Image: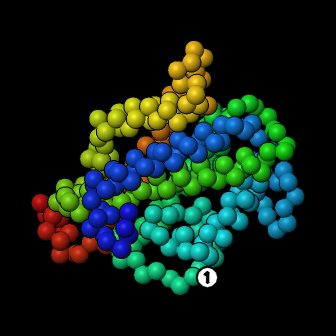
């Protein structure tokens, strides 16, 4: 997606294609994570003695990764949302002057704390191959965790582009909903049950395809590395609802960046 061309970024067809590609990344990342134990030590606060840090090993490792990535401009991109926005560093590379695509407050819409919570509590136990620690693989497990978290975060926060696209294509409807603080109406307007059902079907197919050794595909004892229904369930229960939350939170504030004259046109109707 070319963020230098706002008109292409906010095209709903392009957004859908980007979201479909993100499914591939998330499925592959979860399959990679599934080769390791649940590794509870990685998620226990202060389990390891880390100087000048209060938190668990995964949080520390993710913070180090974000510091490095911030220096190479990762978080200047409009589609990236850091887990530690107050601790990332300034880029070493020259800044990129991206055109304004999202509203000025978009960086304040950040649900990464919720993503971290459901990932550790709900996803890890369901996709890990066994329970408990495998001491030699704690670092490898946390590395996979970081890739999963970043992919899921990008997918969920992409909801801001969906929300912006829907807003600019139907300002009369959304301005009225926002003025009335109609959260239920906004959520209803962004929900497409048929599309959601198609996403879940596609995820099951992808997990079945990607998670099986091709040499065993026509054997009698086919076993996927991650049960496809688990990935679909994670999307249904967590990823899709959190994406909607991002969209609603974004839209409820959208008039902060709207021309007052346009708002007043619908205020009295």
Q: Tell me which residue sits at (74%, 49%) in the image.
A: 140
Question: Could you tell me residue 164's position as x and y percent?
Answer: 31, 61
In the figure, is residue 250 to the left or right of 54? left
Q: Quadrant of the N terminus?
A: bottom left
Q: Quadrant of the C terminus?
A: bottom left
Report which quarter residue 104 is drawn in: bottom left
- Residue sitting nearer the eye, 32 or 126: 32
- Residue sitting nearer the eye, 210 or 118: 210
Q: Tell me which residue sits at (74%, 36%) in the image.
A: 37
Question: Could you tell me residue 13's position as x and y percent?
Answer: 27, 53
Residue reaching furthest to the front: 215
* Picture colour scheme: rainbow
Q: Tell me which residue sits at (46%, 50%) in the image.
A: 22
Residue reaching furthest to the top: 220
Report which quarter residue 215 is drawn in: top right
Residue 209 visible? yes
In the figure, is residue 239 to the left or right of 174? right
Q: Is 71 located above or below residue 50 in the figure? A: below
């Amino acid at each position: 997606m070319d963020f230098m061309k706002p008109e292409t970024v906010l095209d709903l067809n392009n957004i859908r294609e980007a979201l479909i590609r993100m499914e591939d990344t998330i499925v592959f990342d979860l399959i990679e994570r599934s080769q390791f134990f649940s590794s509870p030590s990685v998620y226990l606060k202060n389990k390891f003695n880390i100087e000048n840090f209060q938190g668990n090993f995964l949080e520390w490792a993710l913070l180090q990764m974000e510091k490095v990535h911030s220096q190479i401009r990762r978080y200047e991109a409009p589609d990236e949302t850091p887990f530690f926005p107050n601790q990332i560093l300034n880029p070493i590379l020259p800044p990129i002057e991206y055109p304004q695509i999202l509203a000025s407050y978009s960086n304040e819409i950040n649900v990464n704390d919720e993503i971290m919570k459901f990932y550790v509590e709900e996803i890890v136990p369901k996709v890990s191959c066994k329970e408990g620690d495998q001491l030699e693989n704690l670092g490898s497990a946390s590395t996979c965790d970081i890739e999963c978290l970043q992919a899921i975060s990008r997918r969920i926060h992409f909801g801001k582009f969906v929300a912006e696209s829907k807003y600019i294509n139907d300002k009369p409807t959304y301005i009225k909903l926002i003025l009335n603080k109609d959260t239920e109406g906004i959520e209803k307007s962004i929900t497409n049950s048929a599309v959601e059902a198609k996403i879940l079907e596609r995820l099951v197919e992808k997990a079945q395809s990607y998670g099986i050794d091709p040499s065993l595909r026509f054997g009698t004892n086919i076993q996927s590395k991650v049960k496809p229904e688990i990935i679909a369930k994670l999307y249904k229960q967590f990823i899709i609802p959190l994406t909607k939350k991002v969209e609603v939170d974004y839209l409820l504030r959208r008039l902060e960046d709207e021309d007052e004259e346009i708002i007043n046109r619908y205020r009295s109707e």
